[in-house]
């Protein structure tokens, strides 16, 4: 899946997903003005992991990691500026917003009519459990936020696997092949320590293949 | 004389009480089962209606785009399947003289007869370029705006000058109606009667307002 995977490892999986796509309606210096249906309240700004800029000639997105506070612009009159460029702002003036620092992220600024994106990055990681030391846990976190353990008792055999066509799943994928991943296998193995007097730990688990339907 | 055993009196109605209790338990179990099934049915139905609302919204968006010719409508409502799609367009920017950027928003709703006040609702949005084709003025005269008329022939001219002669309009020079406007040197006069005049006078009067040529 093109651009969807950021990290594809056996114990770490980071995926990128679009939050909102903007069309730039005006640029004032190093500030962009965009329209966001529903306004900022419709956006979970804590999940913003970066921005994207579409090359409309080639259809290729360029991504940069950034938090919302980094790209969130204040001041100015976004609605009035966009209205000056032909935008219909009646009743939705508060839905126009200012973004900034694209010049620092990209070295240049998008212009009116360019397409930009806010995306989130979600990381899933199998690592040492904080809740039950000595075992593994599955953690989840968004960009810039601490990982939170939400599954404990993970077995060391638990992992992520990836398929890039064909029928073979592998544990790791090179960065050059991230765009070719068309299926992810989640091997969710768990381990329960033996009860007092028991001989062996109890292990159980399952695996599921997630096929990515929008892969060309 | 026969005497009934005393334990019969003590056990009188015992079975009936047990049966009533069993019936009550069965009723409770049945009601509980009904509630579980009903709630699951409702959840499945709401999920299905949500999916249908999304399909309606997408269908409305595609229909709006495919039917878009000419002026972009402000809002359009389509009845699609079992739902309604309301598509609104909002102009975001004017890219150039013939190209505008629009934000299209399609809201699909599917009503439930049991909860009409809270229909399933899904919204999809998209940006779209609207390209206007430049007007080719094939006609002899084309009104391009409220203040401009384009002539197919570059040498065409409309200036209000009466090109007719007295031969074209024998009665044009006679003042049969005092007070009525006249055509002096071929130029029209403002005011006078609105009554239609034959020939060149009428033409001059109708063209009393200069028309700008493109």
Image: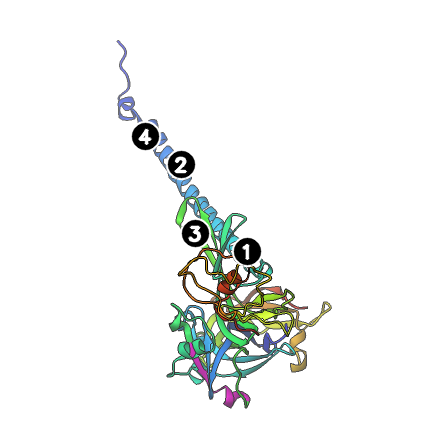
Q: Quadrant of the C terminus of chain B?
A: bottom right
Of the numbered discs 2 and 3, the one sitting upstream in the chain is: 2
- Earlier-in-chain disc, 1 versus 3: 1
Q: Secondary structure at mark 2?
A: helix
Residue, disc 4: B17
The stretch in magenta equals A97-106
| Residue indicated by mark 3 | B119
Q: Report how far apart the C-alphas of labels 1 and 2 lie in the structure.
A: 43 Å
In the displayed structure image, the side of residue B161 where residue A170 appears, left or right: right
B1 in relation to B61, above or below: above
Q: Residue B14 appears at what percent x and percent y?
A: 32, 28
Res. A73 image quadrant: bottom left
The circle on residue B55 is 1
Name above or below for residue A134 compared with residue A195: below
The location of residue A2, given as percent across then percent down, is: 63, 74
The residue lying at 58 percent from left, 58 percent from top is B67
Q: Name the chain under label 2.
A: B
Residue linked to disc 2: B26
Real-space CA distance between mark 3 and mark 4, rounded to the nearest whole angstrom: 48 Å
């Amino acid at each position: 899946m093109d651009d969807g995977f950021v990290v594809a490892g056996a114990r770490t999986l980071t995926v990128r997903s679009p939050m909102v796509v903007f069309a730039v309606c005006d640029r004032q210096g190093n500030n962009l003005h965009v329209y966001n249906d529903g306004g900022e309240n419709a956006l979970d700004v804590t999940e913003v992991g970066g921005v994207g800029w579409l090359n409309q000639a080639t259809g290729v997105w360029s991504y940069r990691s950034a938090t919302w506070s980094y790209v969130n612009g204040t001041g100015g009159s976004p609605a009035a500026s966009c209205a000056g460029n032909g935008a219909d702002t009646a009743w939705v003036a508060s839905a126009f917003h200012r973004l900034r620092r694209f010049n620092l992220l990209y070295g240049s600024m998008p212009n009116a009519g360019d397409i930009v994106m806010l995306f989130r990055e979600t990381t899933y990681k199998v690592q040492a459990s904080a809740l039950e030391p000595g075992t593994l846990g599955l953690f989840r976190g968004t960009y810039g936020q601490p990982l939170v353990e939400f599954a404990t008792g993970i077995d060391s055999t638990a992992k992520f696997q990836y398929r890039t066509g064909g029928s073979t799943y592998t544990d790791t994928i090179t960065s050059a092949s991230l765009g070719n991943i068309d299926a992810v296998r989640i091997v969710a193995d768990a381990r329960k320590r033996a009860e007092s007097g028991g001989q062996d730990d109890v292990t159980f688990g399952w695996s599921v293949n997630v096929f990515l339907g929008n892969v060309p | 004389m026969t005497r009934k055993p005393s334990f019969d009196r003590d056990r009188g109605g015992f079975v009936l009480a047990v049966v009533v209790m069993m019936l009550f338990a069965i009723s409770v179990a049945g009601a509980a089962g009904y509630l579980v099934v009903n709630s699951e049915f409702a959840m499945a139905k709401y999920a299905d209606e949500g999916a249908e609302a999304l399909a309606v919204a997408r269908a409305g968006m595609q229909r709006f785009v495919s039917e878009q010719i000419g002026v972009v409508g402000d809002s359009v409502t389509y009845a699609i399947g079992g739902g309604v799609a309301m598509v609104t367009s909002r102009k975001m920017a004017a890219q150039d003289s013939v190209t505008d950027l629009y934000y299209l928003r399609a809201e699909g709703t599917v009503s439930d007869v049991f909860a009409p006040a809270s229909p399933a609702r899904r919204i999809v949005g998209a940006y779209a370029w609207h390209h206007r084709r430049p007007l080719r003025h094939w006609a002899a005269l084309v009104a391009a705006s409220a203040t401009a008329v384009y002539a197919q022939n570059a040498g065409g001219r409309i200036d209000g000058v009466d090109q007719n002669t007295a031969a074209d309009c024998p009665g044009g020079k006679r003042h049969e109606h005092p007070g009525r406007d006249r055509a002096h040197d071929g130029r029209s006069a403002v005011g006078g009667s609105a009554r239609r005049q034959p020939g060149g006078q009428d033409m001059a009067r109708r063209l009393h307002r200069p028309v700008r040529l493109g």
